[in-house]
Image (cartoon, helix red, strand yellow):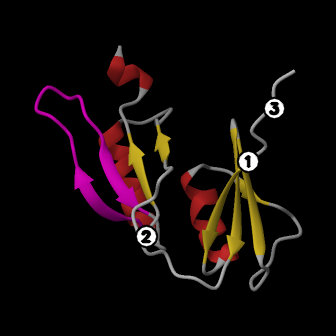
Amino acid sequence: MASLVRHLTIDCSDAYRLGRFWAEVLDGSLADDDFPGDPEALVTAPGSALLFVTVPEAKAVKNRLHVDLQPEDRSRDEEVERILALGASLVGDHRRPDGTGWVTLADPEGNEFCVERSAAERA
């Protein structure tokens, strides 16, 4: 049997704070034993798990790996606005006039991720 991805691990400067942000983005939850100041925070959500680990180094370059989000119950544009209101920042807008494309955002610590069209928008 092949290996399974248990979770994606993201280095950061404040695991709990960044975990809270991503729990809201993914409509997930932090582990019951995660608290402010902890060196790790685990976010679980339907279909995904993200582990945030506090490290001493600051982020220095563009991510080599990033998350692509596809909204389930809202449009890409509505999801972008919701995530921006949670504290993300706009990195690049790659939406096209025909409705295709994506938006690149950064979480509060600068980790890039993309928001793509919903399944309904792709249909």
Q: Is residue 44 left or right of residue 78?
A: right
Q: Is residue 98 left or right of residue 48?
A: left
* Residue located beneath label 2 in the image: 110
Horizontal and vertical percent position of residue 99: 20, 29
Which one is in front, 59 or 23?
Answer: 59
Q: Give neighbour class at mark 3: few <14, some 14-19, many 20+ (Cα, 10 Å).
A: few
| 101, above or below 81, in the image | above
Q: Amino acid at mark 1?
A: His
Marks 2 and 3: CB-CB under 8 Å?
A: no
Q: Amino acid at mark 2?
A: Gly
Marks 1 and 3: CB-CB under 8 Å?
A: no
Q: Residue at x 74, y 83 (%)?
A: 36
* Residue located beneath label 1 in the image: 7
Quick one: label 2 or label 3, which is nearer the N terminus? 3
Q: Is residue 101 left or right of residue 20?
A: left
Tell me where residue 78 sits by quadrant. Answer: top left
Task: State the count of labels.
Answer: 3
Q: Nearer the viewer, mark 2 or mark 3?
A: 3
Horizontal and vertical percent position of residue 50: 68, 54
Task: Give yes or no for residue 6 being in the magenta stretch.
Answer: no
* Residue at the extreme left of the image, as rendered: 97
Q: Amino acid at mark 3?
A: Ser
Quadrant showing the C terminus:
top left
| Span of residues in magenta | 88-106
Horizontal and vertical percent position of residue 102: 30, 40
Tell me where residue 105 sits by quadrant. Answer: bottom left
Q: Residue at x 64, y 85 (%)?
A: 56
* Residue 3 - label: 3
Report how far apart the C-alphas of labels 1 and 3 lie in the structure.
12 Å
Q: Residue at x 66, y 79 (%)?
A: 55
Horizontal and vertical percent position of residue 63: 45, 58
